[in-house]
Amino acid sequence: MLLHLLLPLLNRLIAKQSWAGERLAKHAGKQCLIAIGNVQFRVQIGEGGMLAAGVGNEPPPAVSITLGSDAPLRLISQPETIFSSTRIEGNVDFAEDLSFVFRNLELDIEGEIAKLIGDVPARRIGRALTSIQLQLREAAKRTWANTRDYAVNEAGHLLDAEEVREFTEKVSTLRDDLARLEKRIERL
């Protein structure tokens, strides 16, 4: 369902930016398997570099992209890090072209909305969407910080970075002291 909503939007972006269609067109007929947690879907490259929903399990995908299960949260809080936990397997050229296209597609939400309802309302909606995005990002950061503080300070499930550093220094000191003691014992 989500795929059928995203593909038309992505195809419009690809059509507006001719370089993207040209870059993907050389991979016409190839399929890409995208997995986010337990959700998987296939995308096939059509003529002119346009995207279509892949059908069935044949042929095997030329590229498999596995996003981390935290990808939706990263998309809201830190979109620039969404690919940090991504695993890509398969045809290197196809994967590189897909990556380049999706990193460089430019979405002009205000422009799309302006075509429907006019410039002024589109600008206001654009500002509202930007504000909502910033608020969601801040809420996600605060939630993460609060969860971390709870896990470290309240519940004791995690150790603070400073405590770990101090512990490793003490272990190193103990190891060195033990090595010196062993040498003294050998001399005796």
Image (cartoon, rainbow, N blue to C red):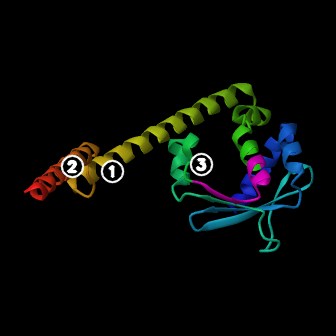
Q: Quadrant of residue 30?
A: bottom right
Q: Where is residue 34 in the image (x, y as percent from the top left)?
A: 68, 61
Identify whether 128 is placed above or below 6: above
**Magenta span has 57?**
no
Q: Where is residue 78 in the image (x, y as percent from the top left)?
A: 52, 41
Residue type beneath disc 1 = Thr
Q: In which quarter of the image is residue 111?
A: top right
Q: Can you identify the residue that label 3 sits on?
A: 83
Residue drawn 87% across the image and 38% down it: 18
Front of the two marks 1 and 3: 3
Q: Can you identify the residue that label 1 sits on?
A: 147
- The residue positioned farthest toward the top in the image shown: 120
Magenta-highlighted residues: 86-97
Residue 27 appearing in the image: yes
Q: Can you identify the residue that label 2 sits on?
A: 167
> Marks 2/1: CA distance?
23 Å
Residue 9 appearing in the image: no
